[in-house]
Image (spheres, rainbow, N blue to C red):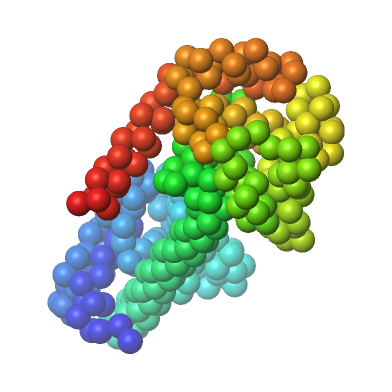
Amino acid sequence: MISAEAILNAKVLIVEDDKVSRRILETILLSSGFRNVRAIPNAKRIRKIYATFQPDLLILDLGLPGIDGFQVMRYLKDDQPDDYLPILVITSESDERVHLRALAGGAKDFLTKPYDRPKVLLRARNLIEVRLLYRELCGKNDELEQRVRERTKELRNSRLDVIRRLGYAAECRDNETGQHIVRMSRYCACLARASGMSDEECDLVLATTPLHDVGKIAIPDAILLKPGPLTPEEWAVMKTHPVVGAEILSGGDSPFLRMAEMIARGHHERWDGTGYPSKIKGDQIPLPARICAVCDVFDALTSDRPYKKAWSVDDAVKEIRKMSEVHFDPMVVDTFMAILPEIRSIKREVDALARELSKERQG
């Protein structure tokens, strides 16, 4: 319920050209304890006054000179299309058509002259109470929407945390720190944005690329961690991880899972069609998978692995250029080169964080 105190604190705006009538209304309201009453003689500046004062009740004369009450209601409806406009119309007309027109224009109730004090107060209080209840409901709706947004954010963050942990589960088997998926997912999001993908698509790329190698879960340690070259038989097993990863992620209807499956399946395809598992080529390879291919190889080259030491960034960049139009989409490679300063910055930032975390664990 709305308290009597809240009603008396409500803002009331009177728009009435007749000085005596205006003064009577003011006196009725003020003498009854209303504290925020403003009265004006015409509607010349009504839009600005209404926006500034923001009344909880508008007492409006239909027969104003110049801009009449009907025009005022149209203005306010245009300015406040989603708001509840508490308008108490003053009229001496008994014509039902005028009343219907006023109701259609936004009037909520009527006052007729001469004024009857109890009726003025009763109708004013009723409309103000409805207005305050409306605002209270809007506030609760806003609060509920905020809670929903916060809960949605929590669920999204929880999902991303599970994704990162699943990615780490696969990646940490051949990368002690697991930082590969952190660097690589950020590289991919940066490259996706520079390649013209939408913000929503870039967010999906950032969220799903940690799962690109999830199929490695099925690869035996003897193969995955082998320090030397793989035999043809071992290599055949290794090449199954894109299919395994895609199968793990398949069957979902969400854009997230579709993107994750697409990247897991396609990140080892090659521009010239000699990749695996499907040997598709060129634009047949989805753009997110082409982006992932470049970033994955770049990070693999610049990281220590069981079978090699990390290359320098400059040597890795030369190798990426060399593989353009063979392994990689040449346009994606050109874009990667254009954003190389950002790529270097991401690598420095993540590597520095990894060193700090390593020190904390050792300490």
Quick check: 245 above or below 104?
A: above
Question: Hey, which quadrant is residue 38 in on the image?
Answer: bottom left
Question: Hey, which quadrant is residue 196 in on the image?
Answer: top right
* Foreground of the two, 63 or 347: 347
Residue 58 appearing in the image:
yes
Residue 152: image x %, image y %? 49, 63
Left or right of 124? Residue 339 is right
Q: Residue at (25%, 70%) from the top-left corner?
A: 10
Q: Residue at (26%, 65%) from the top-left corner?
A: 11
* Foreground of the two, 95 or 249: 249
Q: Residue at (59%, 69%) from the top-left corner?
A: 100
* Foreground of the two, 92 or 207: 207
Residue 343: image x %, image y %? 46, 25
Quick check: 29 above or below 217?
A: below
Q: Total marks drawn?
A: 0
* Quadrant for the N terminus in the image: bottom left
Q: Residue at (21%, 64%) from the top-left corner?
A: 37
Quick check: 104 above or below 297?
A: below
Residue 184 appearing in the image:
no
